[in-house]
Image (spheres, rainbow, N blue to C red):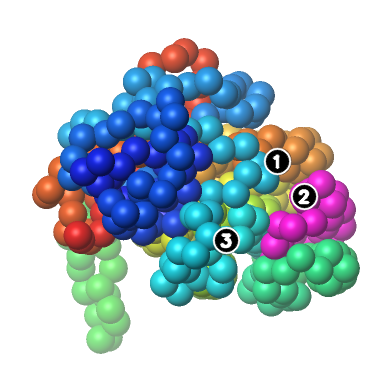
Amino acid sequence: MVMTGRRGNRGSWTAAGLVAALAIGLSISPDAQQSQPTPQQPTFRSGVDVIAVDVNAVDTDGNPIQGLLAEHFTVEIDGRRRRVVSAAFVPHGQSTAGPAGMPAEAGSLDATDPSRVFMIAVDASSFSVGDSRGVVAAARDFVRQLPFDERVGVYTFPLGPRVAPTTDRVAVGQSLESIVGQKQSLRSRYNLTASEVIDINSENAQLNSQLPVRGTGNNQPPVALRGDESEAIRRVQVRECGTVDVRCVEDIRIEASAMGFLLEGQLTESMNGLSAVVQTVSQYPGRKTIVVLSGGMPASDRPGGRPDGGDVAKTLGREAAKANATIYSLFLDTGDSQAFSAERRRVDRTPSPRLRDATVLGRVLEDFAMGSGGAYMRIVIGSGEQALARVLRETSGFYLLGVEPAAADRDGRQRALKVSVTRPGVTIRSRMWVTVPRR
């Protein structure tokens, strides 16, 4: 969330007062500022408007780093550097609300409520029943470690239990316990993996766009004249058929096309779930954290490949950033996280590289998280316990930066935001997009 504040002609703020005024996004009159205590306070020049940008600065283990000053931060809006006026570290539990008597922010539930909102989003369609048990246990342990004044919600998609953000830990726990994996095994005659489906569809699309077509006679649709088959099909052909069999090649192509459309339907359903999560948390004021637990959402990273999610995940991440929500996407890359079960492979077959499958399964989750300035984590061991512990550490404190925008920034449009630090060994979690309100 971007917030604005104006410094008056004679007013000066304490560090806490600056944080408070920035956090609730109000314009402060000179009279209101004069009521604040003044000893040892920085005085700012007349008529300076600032926006508040909240960022996390953590070390390699995810622990918040304290002691950074305004000069340690660099902020760019649309590639142009903007002056960082102030930097205040806000530890978890410290209120960023304004002084008593100030009106609540428009549309907020309670402007003086310092608690955060966490949303646990579970992609049930990506987990088997067995895998979901471990995920649920890890999520419940994560919730237990949150302070009781923190609101926590649960959103299971495409179907499953849902609880609006609440401090009722019993309701949250019962909701998590009732989550059951809904993953369906997709049978593939040729043991195609998600990456093979994408590669075959992509290479076929390129061949079809380059080769002439001929009529088949008897009013049949035209067929592409192929001088060569795709590399992906040849790999599967050698593995599954063992010989140069024209019929085998065509069957592989047909199966890859059918699987691509089927997976694309499932991907659309999953992204609808992510969209609903963003819409839900956007109704709440203050800082929000969305934790997505998924076994993977296969999506093409090649032109013409299917399933194709386009830029929807990135767009959703930007919408989350606009709602002041940070996304942590946890990809639990277990043996069953592939769209097609590896157990069905015959032991004498050579599957496609595992890392390639992990790339296409985690692409949507990564785009979703990075668009909000959050983090993407691939988990190969366990059910996410260590990753969730890191989320707890990273969210235990943040910096509130007072940034002076240019007049051209104040048009209410989304603009690219980049925050960096000069100190080595610091990782910044910051949204990649910002909207500077009009005056």
Q: Is residue 302 visible?
A: no
Q: Which residue is mark 1?
A: 392
In the drawing, does residue 374 fall left or right of residue 414? Answer: right
Which sits earlier in the primary sequence, circle 2 or circle 3?
3
Give me the disc on residue 242: none
Examine the structure image and report whether residue 176 is included in the region drawn in magenta. no
Q: Which residue is mark 2?
A: 146
Tag 1: residue type?
Leu
Q: Position of residue 103 (x, y in %)?
A: 45, 68
Corner quadrant of residue 406: top left
Q: Position of residue 251 (x, y in %)?
A: 52, 63
Residue at screen point 81% across, 47% down: 145
* Labels 1 & 2 near each other (Cβ < 8 A): yes
Corner quadrant of residue 216: bottom left
Magenta residues? Answer: 127-154
Examine the structure image and report whether residue 149 is included in the region drawn in magenta. yes
Mark in the foreground, 2 or 3: 3
Mark 3 to mark 1 CA distance (whole Å): 23 Å
Tag 2: residue type?
Leu
Which sits earlier in the primary sequence, circle 3 or circle 1?
3
Tag 3: residue type?
Thr
